[in-house]
Image (spheres, helix red, strand yellow):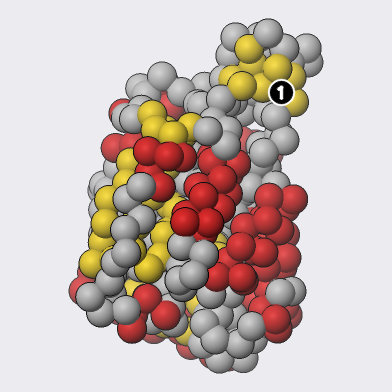
Amino acid sequence: MICQKCKKETTLSKTLPYCPQCIRKNFNSLLPEIIEIHKKNRKKFNLPEKIPDDPNGIDCTVCVNKCKIASNNTGYCGVRKNIQNKISGPDNEWAYVDWYHDPLPTNCVADWVCEGSKDHGYKNLAVFYEGCTFNCLFCQNWQFKQRKNKATVMDIARYADPLTSCICYFGGDPTPFTQHSIALAREILERKRHKKFRVCWETNGSVSPQYTKQWTDIALATNGCIKIDFKAFSEELNIALCGSSNKNTKENIKLVADHMKERGKPPLLIVSTLLIPGYIDEYEITEMARFLSSINTEIPWSFLGFYPHFYFNDLPRTSRKHAEQALQIAKDYGMKNTHTGNVHLLI
């Protein structure tokens, strides 16, 4: 496809017809069009079309979006609301969520370094939150936008039976439901106080660092981990692809990495990057490698194969060349623990 800015032929989706170089270099001029792209697809799911910024709104401080929500309106996540000038919505009692058991070992971003890979005969309690602070055009679990299954902590906690050895929060994203995830973890840990039970979060990293610290404390204490999806390095490209900033993502990677020394194995932090053809280019991978290696070269980093989905259903799958390039760049920057996931998707 031809980039609609520089007119060069490249691999792009018709949904976001600008190459990453143009997005980075011409971000301010392209931003109005990028906002319209996200507005258009969010409208189909009855979600706020842009990050709320009402001058008379109430501040929500759960994530990087820092929504200022007008009366009787919702935040960008679509679940936190301004009701009578107070932020209302998911708390330590309820959430929009689905859950099920996965036999261990399971297909997890961290399966190559997690202790769950040794728990044959046991189960993971997979908790899928139906809401998100990002609006990824390539979302591979986008169906959650059409669901709103409400459940309490107690509804889910009783599923942690004797063969359940861990819980993993994902989605969507656990960020809009951070208090619920913490309350649920504490409830199950109290029930299993004489047994081992790991608690893990898989997230886009947008949550406010104050909550990341609470997640980290629980993960550390239980031999769990924090899995952060590092979607792009440049904030401009992250906004173009996901509708939101990655400032908190970078800050939270640093925050969790600072605690890695408190436990050797299993690693506390795992970073993953989806290799989206045409967008996650050499520049993005190089800058991510530079960033991660400056923090800790021991951080496990998994590169994931992409397959056509959602609004990026017109892109090809990730090539082996793309994956090999990413691994080489990571190695060149001294990253010692790298991995390729979804190998079966590579072409």
Q: Residue 267, relative to residue 108: is it above or below?
A: below
Residue 303 shows in this picture: no
Q: In the figure, is residue 211 to the left or right of 338?
A: right
Residue 34: x percent and y percent?
A: 53, 35
| Residue that mark 1 sits on | 68
Give the amino acid at mark 1. Lys
Q: Quadrant of residue 65?
A: top right
Secondary-structure class at tag 1: strand
Q: Residue 281, relative to residue 147: is it above or below?
A: below
Q: Quadrant of residue 133?
A: top right
Q: Quadrant of residue 14?
A: top left
- Identify the residue at horizontal 43%, vertical 27% (top origin): 42
- Identify the residue at horizontal 41%, vertical 65% (top origin): 166
For the C terminus, which image quadrant?
bottom left
How would you rate the neighbour count of disc 1 (Cα within 10 Å): few for under 14, some for 14-19, many for 20 or more? many
Number of numbered discs = 1
Residue 268: x percent and y percent?
A: 58, 74
Q: Residue 280, relative to residue 49: is it above or below?
A: below
Residue 55: x percent and y percent?
A: 78, 15
Residue 339: x percent and y percent?
A: 42, 82
In the image shown, does 317 or 200 lie closer to the viewer? 200
In the image shown, does 297 or 26 lie closer to the viewer? 297
- Identify the residue at horizontal 38%, vertical 29% (top origin): 150
